[in-house]
């Protein structure tokens, strides 16, 4: 499966007003970085990868369609996968991105 270009456009539009957003091909998909720190990624299987931080990890997992990110075979604290149903509406996508940006905004630029 190739990269979901529709999701890429939605992410670009949702993040268009945020300073310091760049893109980089990573993990077999596309990652969006905020001041050099990964905020979200599009996985080949259509899921979204989000960096929510350790403090909000359990809160994020309690929301529908969110799952542990186990890219390396072990759960990665502060990172989640989100099924397509969890971001099918623009308001839902924005809510998730706001959660991730709240964390990445607290990090020093790279």
Image (cartoon, rainbow, N blue to C red):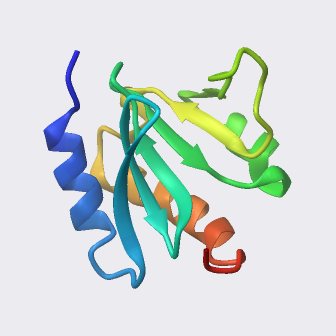
Number of marks drawn: 0
Which quadrant, please, contains the N terminus? top left
Report x, y in % for residue 59.
76, 46
Report x, y in % for residue 67.
63, 26
Residue 61, by quadrant, is top right
Report x, y in % for residue 41.
43, 44
Q: Nearer the viewer, residue 42 or 64?
A: 42
Q: Residue at x 74, y 55 (%)?
A: 53
Which quadrant, please, contains the C terminus? bottom right
Q: Residue at x 22, y 31 (%)?
A: 3
Q: Is residue 3 left or right of residue 74?
A: left
Q: Is residue 75 left or right of residue 18?
A: right
Q: Is residue 43 left or right of residue 10?
A: right
Q: Residue at x 20, y 23 (%)?
A: 2
Q: Examine the rendered structure and indicate whether residue 69 appears above or below residue 90.
A: above
Residue 75, by quadrant, is top right
Q: Residue furthest right?
A: 55
Q: Nearer the viewer, residue 22 or 15?
A: 22
Q: Nearer the viewer, residue 90 or 6?
A: 6
Q: Residue at x 70, y 80 (%)?
A: 108
Q: Examine the rendered structure and indicate whether residue 110 appears above or below residue 99.
A: below
């Amino acid at each position: 499966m190739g990269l979901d270009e529709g999701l890429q456009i939605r992410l670009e539009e949702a993040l268009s007003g945020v300073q310091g957003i760049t893109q980089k091909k990573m993990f077999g998909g596309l990652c969006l970085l905020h001041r050099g720190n990964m905020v979200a990624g599009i996985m080949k299987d259509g899921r979204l990868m989000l960096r929510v931080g350790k403090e909000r990890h359990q809160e994020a997992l309690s929301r529908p369609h969110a799952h542990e990110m186990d890219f390396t075979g072990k759960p990665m604290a502060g990172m989640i996968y989100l099924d397509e149903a969890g971001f099918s509406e623009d308001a839902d996508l924005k809510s998730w991105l706001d959660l991730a940006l709240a964390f990445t905004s607290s990090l020093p630029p790279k």
